[in-house]
Amino acid sequence: MSRLSFNQITSGHASLAEAVNACVKHGVEWIAPWRHKLSAKPAEDARLIREAGLKISSLCRGGMFPAATAAERSERIDDNRRAIEEAATLGAPVLVLVCGPAPDRDLDGARRMVEDGIAILAPIARSAGVQLGIEPLHPMFAASRSVVVTLEQSLKMAEPFGPEVGVVIDAYHVWWDPNLYSLIERARGRIAGFHVSDWIPLLADPLMSRGMMGDGSIELRRIRAAVDSAGYTGPIEVEIFNESLWRKPAEDTVRLCAARFEERVL
């Protein structure tokens, strides 16, 4: 259980303080904040987390590189620079990148923008002591959230760089891939994070229908074992977008996450 990290989005309506307090109450040692939940003073957020005795597994999120104009692309690079600064201030070792959709149906062009953006940010991240974690999303999100939709694509984008660029393996997004286990092994030394939730058949809303571990179709324990075998020993984030969970008090959600993590992931 020492590897369990509570990704703040799993209690989407809770404040950072509420999520921190819930983790402390239920013995969860790690938390993964989201940028939109931070205050205007990340140093104070860092102090809140540190004084509670918690560690930070990652900061969500950077990315969203593709844009229709050069000016918009520049603004997004600037936002990613700020995200790296925030991660460094918090002491977050990883900035998770959700890479963004194509603005004009040009998937290849959008992927080049992602590659160009990462190339600009990599030396900045290296200097700040922050690892960029490229997270592939399920292909159903290609039109709305990310043109990077397989672990293989993420690895190809990360491999030209040093350890300052890695990949984030989210079971919800990659569980379906017939090459998953060989790709996890290929990711050895590049795994910046591992996220768990579950896939519920007949999704009402692709974004907001993630299930609690054990409620869906993913072989979570097998994927976790493969990630471990590839050398990743870091925290495992429970990241669940689900409005029914968001309506619960943070303490109830953290307690359920801890129980299911032990039952279905370890």
Image (spheres, grey):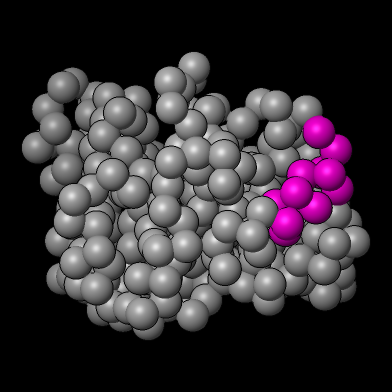
Q: Identify which residue is drawn at 19% across, 67% down.
A: 182
* Number of numbered tags placed on the structure image: 0
Magenta-colored stretch includes residue 217: no
Q: Is residue 27 left or right of residue 130?
A: right
| Vertical side of 208 occupied by 90: above or below | below
Magenta-colored stretch includes residue 251: yes
Q: Is residue 230 left or right of residue 21?
A: left
Nearer to us in this view, 180 or 70: 180
> Can you say which quadrant of the picture contains the N terminus?
bottom right
Q: Identify which residue is drawn at 24% across, 57% down.
A: 180
Residue that extends furthest to the top in the rendered view of this protein? 204
Q: Quadrant of residue 149?
A: top left
Q: Identify which residue is drawn at 51% across, 53% down.
A: 196
Image position, residue 36 (x, y; %)? 64, 41
Magenta residue span: 248-259
Q: Does residue 29 appear anywhere in the picture?
A: yes
Q: Is residue 235 left or right of residue 217?
A: right
Nearer to us in this view, 230 or 78: 230
Image position, residue 239 (x, y; %)? 57, 48
Q: Quadrant of residue 64?
A: top left
> Can you say which quadrant of the picture contains the C terminus?
bottom right
Image position, residue 255 (x, y; %)? 80, 52
